Image (spheres, grey):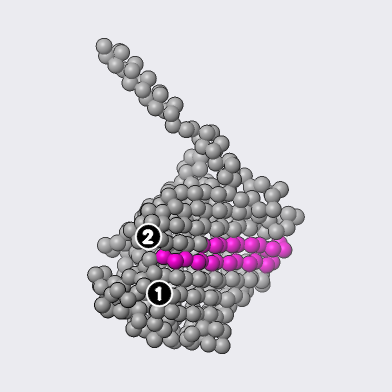
Amino acid sequence: MITLALSGLFACNSNAHSLLPDRVQIDRWLRPLGASDKFDATKRIDWGLMPGPFYTPELGLGLGIAAVGIYRPDASDSTSQNSTMTLSGYVSSTGALGLNFNNYTFYAGDRWRFFLDGTLNNTPAYFWGQGFAAGDDNPDKQKYRAQALALKPVIYRRLTRFTYLGIGWSLDMLHAANSGDNRYHRIEQPPQGASSLSSGASAELSWDNRDFVPNPRSGQQARIRYTHYAPETGSDTRFEALNLHYSHYHPLTDSSVLAWELYGEFTQGQVPWNMLAQLGNSHRMRGYYAGRYRDKNVISGQLELRKKLSWRHGIVAWLGAGTMSPSFHQLNNGRWLPSTGVGYRFEFKPRMNIRLDYGIGKSSSGFYFQVGEAF
């Protein structure tokens, strides 16, 4: 009887395993979508497409799709790293629509670079106000629908082996629709009101020897960027933004990397409420609702361990912290917020990961589904 029972159990397990697809079968299914562990240099752009469902409390149940392209502008250029292009979009049950674009292009033996970040969305959002006290006042947050367009092109010229000078532009347009159903009307209180247009020229100096920008395994980057917004450049108000960034990537083994980052954003002048520095987004201080904590000055740091597993799988874990204040000199007097979390990686194209992160903050958490590493 025991023998028959064990035989039946093993037979059931064997049948169950036979019903599940193996790696070869999954690779076969992904191949028509462009998923491959090798870059096809014969194609003008080697595209891959990855659809998938998602759920967040803000957007509800939705469907997202990510298109990843790898290419080389000059096939004879053996010095530059591969150029990449990602395009991701989503729709959700709350009526949210969004489109994100990211491009890293390397030319002429890496003497020239062109980077472009862009977003276009129509999504439900919340506004708490400026400062820690406003962000802590969760019951009185104001709901609105963010209709936004943002573009940040930068062209770089190499000065020395790893030093680049960049000239760019920053355009940010936002209209807060359907914002009149809250008794505090916080969005209407700032001088800019519910609509804001910020447009300005930027200059950047960076030192960058990362081996692959979207997913570095080694190297480091130090960057300083200054942006001046003024009516003469199409902006509603006059203000300035200074961004400081340093990241380092240290390979511990062939399959693991220790990455860490320091970041600072400092603004002054007539800064619109939507252009205040934010403590929490999909790249740093993950676990906090984007825009809940915002002020004129923000600093943060994070340490992340990235581990490549078998086949296409990978995992990460991180720790971070950040603070903010209305003035630079008060940053040391403010309180610090923690950030921690874990994530899963699926290598859809060579060294191009689909990432799913779960971040945990103080009395806050959030899921993130994007292409490429957080930093």
Q: Position of residue 46 (x, y in %)?
A: 64, 50
Q: Is 311 on the left or on the right of 115, as rendered?
A: left
Gap between marks 2 and 1, in whole Å?
A: 16 Å
Q: Residues within 10 Å of mark 2 (few under 14, many from 20)?
A: few
- Relative to 352, does residue 113 appear above or below in the rendering? below
Q: Is residue 353 magenta?
A: no
Magenta span: 100-123
Q: Residue furthest right?
A: 76
Q: Position of residue 110 (x, y in %)?
A: 68, 63
Q: For residue 69, what is the image quadrant?
A: bottom right
Instruction: Give the residue type at disc 1.
Output: Ala
Instruction: Give the residue type at disc 2.
Output: Thr
Find numbered disc 2 in the image and state the secondary structure of the residue it sits on. Answer: loop
Q: Position of residue 275 (x, y in %)?
A: 44, 77
Seen from the viewer's position, the closer of residues 261 and 129 is 129
Find numbered disc 1 in the image and state the secondary structure of the residue it sits on. Answer: strand
Residue at 62% across / 53% down in the picture?
Answer: 70
Q: Report the number of discs.
A: 2
**Looking at the rendering, in which quadrant would you find the N terminus?**
top left
User: What residue would you read off at disc 2?
Assistant: 94
Residue 131: tell me if it is visible: no
Main SS, magenta region, reads strand
Seen from the viewer's position, the closer of residues 318 and 85 is 85
